[in-house]
Amino acid sequence: MAEHTRDTGELARALRAAVGGEVDFSPAARALTTMDASNYRRVPAGVVAPRDADDVAAVLEVCRHHGVPVVPRGAGTSIAGQATGTGVVLDFTRHMNKILDVTPEERTARVQPGVVQARLQDAARPHGLLFGPDPSTHSRCTLGGMIGNNACGSHSVAWGTTADNVHALSVLTYAGTRHRLARGGPPDSGPPGLTDLVDRNLALLRTGYPEGLPRRISGYALDALLPEKGADLARAFCGSEGTLAVLTEATVRLVAAPAARALAVIGHPDESAAAEAAAGLLPYAPLTVEGMAEDLVPAGHGLPRGGAWLFVETGGDSPAQARDRAERILRAADALDGTVVDDPAAVRALWRLREDASGTATRRADGGEAWPGWEDCAVPPARLGAYLRDFRALLAQHGLRGTPYGHFGDGCVHVRIDFDLLSKDGVRRFRAFSEQVAALVVAHGGSLSGEHGDGQARAELLPKMYGDELVGLFGRFKDLWDPAGGMNPGMLVRPDPLDANLRFAVLPARPVDVAFGYPQDGGDFAGAVRRCVGVAKCRTEDAAAGGGVMCPSYRVTGEEQHSTRGRARLLHEMLAGEIVTDGWRSTEVRDALDLCLSCKGCRSDCPVGVDMATYKAEFLHHHYAGRRRPAAHYAMGRLPRWLRAAAPLAPLVNAAARVRPLAALAKRLAGVAPERDLPRLAPETFRRWLRDHMGDRAEVLEQGRTAVLWPDTFTDHLSPSAGRAAVRVMEAAGIGIVLPPGRVCCGLTYVSTGQLDLARKVMRHTLDVVEPLLDLDVPVVVLEPSCAATLRTDLPELLGDDPRTARLAGSVRTFAQALEECAPDWEPPVIGRPVAGQTHCHQHAVLGDAAERRLRERAGLHGALSGGCCGLAGNFGFEKGHYEVSVACAEEQLLPAVRAAAAGTELLADGFSCRTQLEQLAGRRARHLAEVLAEGLDERPGQGRDERPDRGPVTK
């Protein structure tokens, strides 16, 4: 189309006057939509979130008048670049995200384009139905995006692609024409001239497409318009990548959900052997035949022996029938090893391995980066093994590495390859490899895309697959729909070159000066930011379903800028300097990071290990360098300093906090939310109590039975009962306790507020104090999970030049881990009560809670703790302006679980923040696991009773 208007201000004003939804041309909105999950980046003029089809029509009219292109966008998880654009981006996830109806008797659902696939499944499930296509991004991808890409997923061997499951589509062209495209509907329901185009090219349409390809996604599906195929215009529209018209509504087919499922996990020597075996399993009518190699599987996975595995799911009317079908497949497979799993939790955990592969494959075991670009070709299933051998040889020829995985039953392979997309020579190799591998795919009778579409990554290569004549026909088809060229230009037809618009080109060529070491990214902050490849697991709406923490603020607001991906995108654009132009002083980045709870959930839950808590601390460090900080940074960021000063005056401080005017004044000066109660200071610190308790006795330092007990700030000044209880239990277990000889602090509050110079000063002092203890080579028991996580991660990443950091970090243990390590034969008291509460988000992300779960089981504390984040998250929930978000985070999992708990349930929360949140929002007192066990010791027959864990010092 013609060069569009340069006056974006005029365009924005016209859109605001015409549209009921949000119109956002701010730098932040544009920065958030420059990229999808591909290698590409294009800068849009602005973003519109339409409320309905009339809004879409109004946007199209304004853009047509101004000569500006339009790019429809769902969750932005496309991997070929088709969800990026230079004009106005239509964001359907904010308003046009409704399920309009589900009709069980017809097995159909009517949806808007922004509906997340998982929400449709939730709506269909009560009727015993489901939507068949299920990409690994099903927790965040939208139906509109799935239709645009003709997405498939792991169950396509049973239920087909999205195009196979579409009944009717309502669309609006760039010219403003409305069309209703229905399966079996009149062939002239599309734009004028379409029937004539088909009639004049019948021979080409009948012979120009490869046969035997269940996953032929590349190009336009014009063969669906053949008379013998029912002139199915709805099917032909699927996979058009937003280049023809804007989808405003869809009616989709639902299928009967199996009553029961089982999963056969079949081990093979390598992925070629697994690929060759996959086609032979199709006659057994499996629901899935997925393949992945050991490169993508974490250590300790527990899978059967092998170097690659097939995940073959079966369904049945009963668990026994589903398992019998899976066992029959396992017997028929030419396998090295195998097993059948039918426990739903175990099956879900195995599927999570497969679903995370698109992110996991982006970071190689040696720390190298790998990228899409040749992401999802497909060949006839019987040819997959031979293709993979040739593909491996071509990789070796170019000196490249990649690990194939994917939908082996459909002959579809995903792979991330370690292209060098930062240098000119690397980009030239990327192009040469892409051209040669396209020829290889065609030689095997395959399709350049088997799931994710062509976008910019492959559209330039379509003539290799289809020939110039058929590709020319694609252009004429596009022009019938969009003669002005306003719909997503540069994709599919007349595409941009595959090596143009690469998103890495705008990043600084040299590492920027930073405080953290970023050891996994070669010390390069840009490399850390590049970790985010856009798969958007952080946009999952239900953390409980995924068993994770990430990303609590996104689930509260639903705003892209409050997702881990959105923040990473803004940091990317900050480094690029084109849209976000004021670098570390950026208000756009600051505002997006303001609602980051620093929960560290992304560090473990993000498939590529994005660590937004660290990036936030880094940003705040630079943003406020030489400037006045928010009051909360001085008050809560330097909390250890204030608590030490206030400790001698604890009774007076507590009394003052109960005087409302004084408390209100203190909170206002400290930047504390007025809705919060100030925590009560302990009349006696834990450290002082422990010194009195230990007296003059010297611990017998028995190797393997001794531990350093870390007096963290929260335990020391705010929750000494947890510390006293831990001492009681450790002594009962026969563990000798050593106390650090001086004041220690992990530096957590300084880190979380970005006061990294002070954090390093505090940490160096701590290392000086504990250095003599490091030679003991004993565990360091840290009762507060957030402090333990800081010592384990932030300490070595801030002071990587000090060899003592690795020794201290490697010694850190949680309370349960220390008991297991130092007293493996000790039997805890049997409490015999159900539990509720929460696993601390930092423990989930950094430390793990396997030892805690085992200890609870041995103590007869049955039931699971909530996941997610409590929402207080250290200083976050106390800061002014964060209260509502903090409460909403707690309402997601923690508070409902506590309210639903039966009488007599023990409330557990090892984190001070979690306990405080429960006390202030639910009026319920939770306890550290050590407190519960200490109380159990007092109730054991024959046990001496030193103290109840929450009642002052031990009586000697």
Image (cartoon, helix red, strand yellow):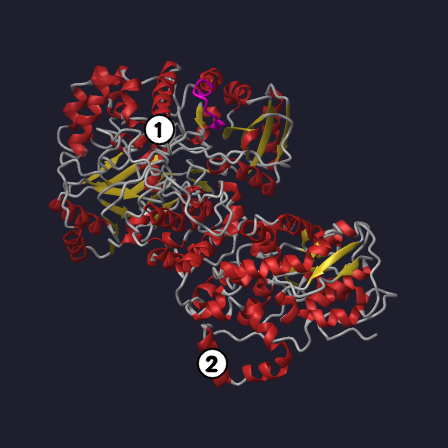
Cα–Cα span, label 2 and label 1: 60 Å
Residue 931, x across and y down, in percent: 71, 65
Please tell me which residue is depicted at 45% across the width and 54% down the height of the picture: 618
Could you say which quadrant of the image residue 72 lies in? top left
Taking 767 as reference, is 881 left or right? left
Q: Position of residue 550 (x, y in %)?
A: 49, 51
Location of the C terminus by quadrant is bottom right
Asked if residue 108 lies left or right of residue 722, the reply is left
What are the residue bounds of the magenta stretch?
395-407
**Considering depth in this image, is 846 or 304 the residue closer to the camera?**
846
Name the outermost residue toward the right: 942
**Image quadrant where residue 266 sits:** top right
Query: Is residue 509 depicted above or below 895 in this figure?
Result: above
Inspect the image, locate mark 1, and give the three-letter code of the amino acid beneath it.
Answer: Val
Image-quadrant location for residue 562: bottom left
SS for callout 2 = helix
Q: How many marks are shown on the rendered structure?
A: 2
The quarter of the rendered structure image containing the N terminus is: top left
Where residue 617 appears, x then y in whole percent?
A: 47, 56
Q: Earlier in the sequence, mark 2 or mark 1?
A: 1
Is residue 281 covered in magenta?
Answer: no
Q: Is residue 292 above or below residue 835?
A: above
Graded by Cα atoms within 10 Å as few (under 14), some (14 to 19) or many (20 or more), the crowding at tag 1 reads some
Give the residue number, with chain letter if any, for mark 1.
427
Q: Amino acid at mark 2?
A: Ala
Q: Which residue is mark 2?
A: 664
